[in-house]
């Protein structure tokens, strides 16, 4: 069992949740969740996602109390799964079907996702805002190659969640590796600056910050520091 890097979640009911994945040294990896519903005194693990390939993931809470998990995958697009609670508990909950969005990204890379504190009005309906950071891939076209050359064009994508059926619509993005980093509703905007693992957070003033790997020196890790991933930190006013 490997922990997905990034951040966990404390739900509205007080459950502590972290995404994890199982890996047996072969090609298949499977996302799951570890959780505590007694303030950390005991921990349990959900069933794993029964799909061909998922691993590192980010978890959000929907208005219904169920969970939405964005997972690393091989679809070349942002992909999520819902986890339905069992009478308000994660114990014996149920995984939903794979939902492949139309948002191109390098999907074989860790991503980060948060629910923003402010809602947005869309066609007269107030909707929750989800922010997801991931590399968009060369020329913003997406990829499922985890080679460093394909981890580029970092973006923060903005999605809106319908409050009735919890479907998502995608409204634009910020080019993180662009010097300007302006929000744009034009999904075709991109640059090819290096961007790999990342972590999003919302600050007290409602700005959004991102910590991300902005270059790569070698592959993997080494005790002598010869292999490393330098990081950058940026903040945006939403």
Image (cartoon, grey):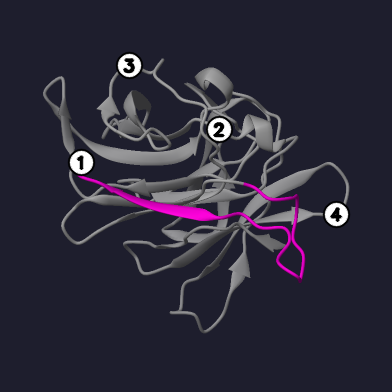
Q: Is residue 132 left or right of residue 29?
A: left
Q: Nearer the viewer, residue 120 or 227?
A: 227
**Mark 1 packing: few (<14 Cα in 10 Å), some, or many (20+)?**
few
Kindly identify the residue that appears in the image at 52 percent across and 44 percent down.
111
The circle drawn on residue 186 is 3
Quarter holding the N terminus is bottom right
**Mark 2 packing: few (<14 Cα in 10 Å), some, or many (20+)?**
many
Q: CA distance from mark 1 to mark 3?
A: 16 Å
Q: Secondary structure at mark 4?
A: loop
Q: Is residue 225 magenta?
A: yes
Of callouts 3 and 2, the N-terminal one: 2
Q: CA distance from mark 1 to mark 2?
A: 23 Å
Of callouts 2 and 4, the N-terminal one: 4
State the extent of the magenta-drawn residues as a range: 216-238
**Mark 3 packing: few (<14 Cα in 10 Å), some, or many (20+)?**
few
Q: Pointers 3 and 4 in contact (CB under 8 A)?
A: no
Is 25 rendered above or below residue 52? Answer: below
Q: CA distance from mark 3 to mark 4?
A: 41 Å
What residue did someone put label 4 on?
24
Q: CA distance from mark 2 to mark 4?
A: 28 Å
Q: Secondary structure at mark 2?
A: loop
């Amino acid at each position: 069992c490997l922990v997905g890097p990034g951040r966990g979640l404390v739900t509205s009911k007080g459950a502590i949740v972290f995404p994890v994945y199982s890996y047996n040294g072969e090609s298949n990896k499977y996302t799951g969740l570890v959780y505590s519903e007694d303030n950390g005194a005991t921990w349990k693990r959900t069933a794993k996602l029964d799909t061909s390939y998922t691993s590192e993931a980010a978890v959000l809470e929907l208005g219904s109390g169920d969970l939405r998990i964005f997972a690393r995958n091989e679809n070349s697009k942002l992909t999520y799964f819902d986890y339905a609670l069992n009478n308000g508990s994660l114990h014996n909950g149920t995984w939903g079907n794979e939902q492949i969005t139309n948002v191109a990204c390098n999907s074989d890379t860790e991503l980060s996702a948060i629910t923003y504190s402010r809602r947005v009005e869309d066609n007269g309906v107030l909707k929750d805002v989800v922010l997801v950071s991931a590399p968009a891939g060369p020329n913003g076209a997406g990829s499922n190659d985890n080679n460093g050359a394909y981890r580029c064009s970092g973006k923060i994508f903005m999605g809106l969640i319908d409050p009735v059926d919890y479907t998502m619509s995608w409204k634009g993005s910020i080019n993180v590796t662009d010097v300007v980093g302006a929000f744009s509703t034009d999904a075709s905007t991109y640059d090819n600056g290096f961007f790999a693992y990342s972590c999003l957070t919302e600050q007290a003033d409602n700005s959004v910050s991102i910590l991300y790997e902005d270059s790569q020196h070698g592959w993997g890790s080494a005790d002598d520091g010869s292999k490393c991933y330098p990081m950058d930190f940026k903040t945006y006013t939403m």
